[in-house]
Amino acid sequence: MLNEFWNTSTGSYKALVFGAMGLIAAGILLNIAGNLSRIDGLTAASLPVIGVGLVLHSTGVVVRGQGVRRRLQK
């Protein structure tokens, strides 16, 4: 049985998770910087970055679910 999913997960899944977290963090930082400096373009540009991070996160959830299903069937 899987005790710790992170230890048994693939490198591609780990890269996907860290990429998603990095994009979300970068988008949040861009949004904060845009709001503090009152640059509307920077604030608006941060939203697609956050969106791509969320899509990658959702993809990671699907990949993780498929991996768990595959391991449980063995």
Image (tube, rainbow, N blue to C red):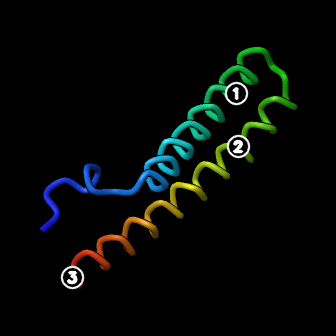
- Looking at the rendered structure, the kind of residue marked 1 is Leu
The single residue placed furthest to the right in the displayed view is: 41
Looking at marks 2 and 3 on the same chain, the residue that comes earlier in the sequence is marked by 2
- At mark 3, the secondary structure is loop
Residue bearing mark 2 = 49
Task: Indicate whether 27 appears above or below 2.
Answer: above
Residue bearing mark 1 = 30
Q: In which quarter of the image is the N terminus?
A: bottom left
Question: Whole-percent x and y of residue 52?
Answer: 67, 52
Residue bearing mark 3 = 74
Q: Which of 52 and 1 is in front in this view?
A: 1
Task: Indicate whether 23 appears above or below 56.
Answer: above
Q: In which quarter of the image is the C terminus?
A: bottom left
Measure the C-alpha gap from mark 1 to mark 3.
Answer: 45 Å
Q: Which of marks 1 and 3 is in front?
A: 3
The reply to whether callout 1 and callout 2 are in contact (CB within 8 Å) is: yes
- Looking at the rendered structure, the kind of residue marked 3 is Lys
Horizontal arrangement in the rendering, residue 13 relative to residue 34 (left or right):
left
Measure the C-alpha gap from mark 2 to mark 3.
Answer: 38 Å
Checking the image for residue 64, the label placed there is none
Question: Whole-percent x and y of residue 49?
Answer: 70, 43
Q: Nearer the viewer, mark 2 or mark 3?
A: 3
Which residue is depicted at the point 29% across and 50% down? 6
Question: Whole-percent x and y of residue 18?
Answer: 49, 42
Measure the C-alpha gap from mark 1 to mark 2.
Answer: 9 Å
Looking at marks 1 and 2 on the same chain, the residue that comes earlier in the sequence is marked by 1
